[in-house]
Image (cartoon, rainbow, N blue to C red):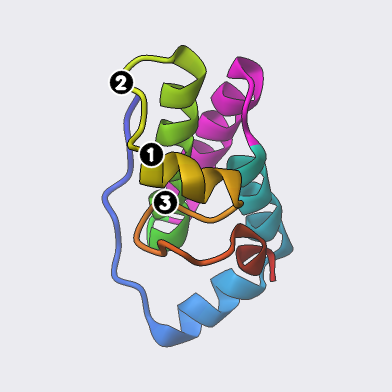
């Protein structure tokens, strides 16, 4: 799968992205994906979003949560205990460690 080259993000563009309801739905989809079908759909939705919005580093970073969900689903290379604890509390595991996932929904 081809991924877009990321583009610089301006402050004005960041405000537009944060206010976008479709982006909020996508982040919610990513954060709530737990089954194989949900994870696969979230990967596809993330890819489509990034192709259209190559400056959205937040959606890119949310892919780390998908990766952890995928690892947890397969049981291979179990995530470290601190990651499991954060996931069970509904917090992110990426650059926003400790930030409540629901805060990303706006």
- At 49% from the left edge and 54% from the top edge, which residue is drawn? 92
Q: Position of residue 4 (x, y in %)?
A: 32, 44
Q: Is residue 32 above or below residue 74?
A: below
* Of the image marks 2 and 3, the number of the one nearer the N terminus: 2
Residue 81 - label: 1
- At 71% from the left edge and 52% from the top edge, which residue is drawn? 25
* Of the image marks 1 and 3, the number of the one nearer the N terminus: 1
| Front in this rendered view, residue 26 or 105 | 105
The span shown in magenta is: 33-53
Residue 78 included in the magenta stretch of the image? no
- Distance of mark 2 from mark 3, alpha carbons? 16 Å
Residue 93 - label: 3
Q: Position of residue 46 (x, y in %)?
A: 51, 41
The label nearer to you, 1 versus 3, is 1
- Horizontal side, residue 57 vs residue 21: left or right: left
Q: Position of residue 48 (x, y in %)?
A: 52, 39
């Amino acid at each position: 799968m081809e991924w877009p080259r990321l583009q610089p993000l301006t402050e004005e563009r960041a405000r537009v992205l944060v206010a976008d309801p479709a982006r909020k739905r996508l982040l919610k989809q990513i954060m709530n994906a737990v089954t194989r079908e949900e994870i696969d759909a979230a990967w596809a939705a993330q890819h489509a979003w990034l192709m259209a919005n190559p400056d959205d580093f937040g959606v890119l970073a949310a892919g780390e949560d998908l990766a952890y969900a995928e690892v947890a689903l397969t049981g291979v290379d179990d995530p470290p205990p601190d990651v499991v604890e954060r996931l069970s509390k509904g917090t992110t595991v990426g650059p926003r460690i400790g930030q409540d996932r629901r805060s990303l929904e706006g």
